[in-house]
Amino acid sequence: MTTVRVRNATKTFGRTTALDDVTLDAGPGVTGLLGPNGAGKTTLLRVIATVLAPDRGAVTLMGRDPARPSDRTRIRERLGYLPQDAGFHRGFTVFEFIDYVAILKEMTDRRPRHDEVRRVIALTGLAAVSAKRIRALSGGMRRRVGLAQALLGDPDLLVLDEPTVGLDPEQRLRFREMISQAGEGRTVVMSSHQTEDITALCATIAVIHQGRARFTGTPAELTARADGRVWTDERRSPAAITAWRTGDGTYRNVGDPPARAELIPPTLEDAYLLLMGEPGREVTHS
């Protein structure tokens, strides 16, 4: 089942083309958008979240057309969205803020609304701080608050923009666990510029660069593109497009290896670096 269908979407802001003929499908599970800052990931997620409409192209979400006001209302009832900047009212407590968002989502009956607020607070591990003001929380806790409000109403489609940005390693691992659980039985579309998060969470990925989808497919398919193009050496090879010294003192080289190079298995990050070094080349897997 396809929850998200984006076809040839283009979006410009003045002279800047943020999306350039992008096509994307996403179904149940976690789909990741990978790319550098400024690549167009946020614009694409805002289109999927019905915050923006494309200038050209077609978008279908949960079988409905967000260009139609009645459909857009129905979509938003079944959609949860975590933007990079969630716009917290920092004077609110955790409970008050999530309850406020629930009211905006037209959960007007107080008792069941509060039950739902308590459910998402418990689901995201915020019960112990529900009475604390948001300004007193750590960055990781504030990201949990953002995820909690996105989960209100048990949405079928969850849109997460850089959900692990600014988190320390322990917080990122805990957040990955929550996103993985959130992806069970629903569609999650998330962006990241961290290949580790994409590798850990996503069954399908799209690499976005300069407003275009440079690759769509599975992490394994992208990683396979780097087979035979990663090797170790005692020095940085002039044939490498990028190389770095590892902890054991050898260099990990990525590029076109010389003869008799000591090849090693590639990672998703290696393949991503190679793809970014091949401008204009697009590969799509069905």
Image (cartoon, rainbow, N blue to C red):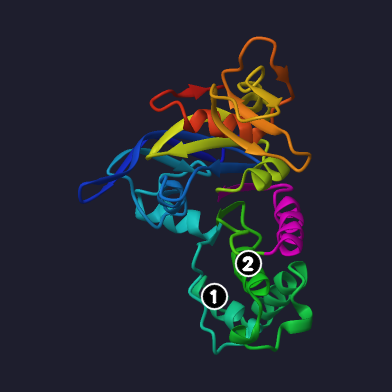
Magenta stretch: includes residue 71: no
Res. 260 image quadrant: top right
Residue pushed farthest front? Answer: 235
Query: What x and y, as percent, mark residue 59?
Result: 41, 41
Give the camera-side residue of 252 and 109.
Answer: 252
Tell me the kind of residue under disc 1: Val
User: Is residue 21 rendered to the left or right of residue 37?
Assistant: left
In the depicted view, which residue is nearer to us: 96 or 232? 232
Asked if the residue under mark 1 is in contact with the one under mark 2, i.e. CB atoms within 8 Å, the reply is: yes
Residue 218 in view here:
no
Q: Amino acid at mark 2?
A: Leu
When asked about the image quadrant of residue 198, the answer is top right
Residue 224, horizontal then vertical, whole percent: 66, 22
Q: Which residue is mark 2?
A: 152
- Image position, residue 214 (x, y; %): 46, 30
Residue positioned 76% across, 62% down in the render: 170
Q: Position of residue 33 (x, y in %)?
A: 54, 43
Q: Which residues are magenta?
A: 168-192
Residue at image coords 58%, 49%: 190
Mark seen at residue 101: 1
Q: Is residue 252 above or below residue 67?
A: above
Q: Secondary structure at mark 1?
A: helix
Q: Please say if 11 is above or below 233.
A: below
Q: Which residue is nearer to you in this view: 69 or 98?
A: 98
Q: Residues within 10 Å of mark 1 (few under 14, many from 20)?
A: some
- The mark nearer the N terminus, 2 or 1, is 1
Where's the N terminus, which quadrant? Answer: top right
